[in-house]
Image (spheres, rainbow, N blue to C red):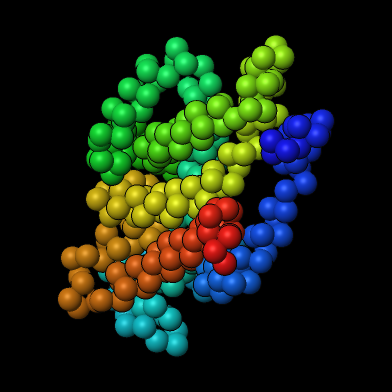
Amino acid sequence: MVAAVENGARPTEAVSHSPTWTRIKDALRRHPGAIVGGLVLLALIAMAALAPWLGTLDPEAISPIRRLRQPSAAYWFGTDMLGRDVYSRVVYGARVSLTVGLSVALLATLAGLAIGLVTGFVRWLDGTIMRVMDGLMSIPSVLLAIALMALTKASLQNVIMAIAITEVPRVVRLIRSLVLSLREQPYVEAAIAAGTRAPLILTRHILPNTVAPLLVQATYICASAMLTEAILSFLGAGTPPNIPSWGNIMAEGRSLFQIATFLIFFPGLFLSLAVLSVNMLGDGLRDALDPRLSRNM
């Protein structure tokens, strides 16, 4: 980057010509686990999108005569205490978990990116904002999400907002540390000395260098959000009972675990697959985008 500035080229030209996607493809080829994780995640997204066609029955259809049926050819994952088809509920539950995971990852990364850029670049705001972020991080994320949900009514939108708020401080700390490091680079100091406006410095010289670590962080936020949503729903502080989610299904079956293990096993299995696939994909992206790991491959 410094060489590019010395040769008269703009720093953005060096960034734009960086072989980022080439390194990602090379790293993914060297890490088949990341490819498997990506394929599993795509399969789960396809399952959620095609839920109306993949579900064999209405997930909310109650039938007392078929309650607590064991898994069979007619009911692949069995039925619950109200006679609802567990397979259909698990398929529709993928919509809730993936929607929460992807939405929280998007909201938390965007909000954390904006706050982190300003905090790291504007020194007089750093102390105040970071003390607020430290205060939020001092509270366990699940407890903070439960407290936020207690102030609102149960809904999918409120669950997304509550979990996103708990994840923002982690993104802010990551971006702030990157900005503080990048601010000391010669090309940024040269731009400041030349009188370049702060918004232009942030968008042209600093923002492009935060995309790679932010992308990796977003995958871990997605996995964490899906787990947190399941915990909230399991505790009765998440999505309403009328919305099938993996956490709700497990919560409804916990009292019958000894006689109907399948009520917890199948939603727990799909939740584990979703979280594991996202984490495997995130590990592959981290290896691809971390320069230190790239040199060792």
Above-or-below relation of 219 to 27: above
**Residue at image x 70%, y 56%?**
21
- Residue at the farthest right position: 8
The quadrant of the image that shows the C terminus is bottom right
Above-or-below relation of 163 to 19: above
Residue 82 is left or right of residue 22, and the answer is left
Residue 199 is left or right of residue 146, and the answer is right
**Residue at image x 32%, y 83%?**
70
Residue 246 in the image: state x and y as whole percent: 38, 61
Residue 203 in the image: state x and y as whole percent: 67, 28
**Residue at image x 64%, y 60%?**
24
Q: Nearer the viewer, residue 226 or 23?
A: 23
Identify the image quadrant of residue 188: top right
**Residue at image x 56%, y 31%?**
182
Specify whether residue 243 is in view.
no
- Residue at the farthest bottom position: 73
Q: Nearer the viewer, residue 106 or 81?
A: 106
Residue 133 in the image: state x and y as whole percent: 36, 28
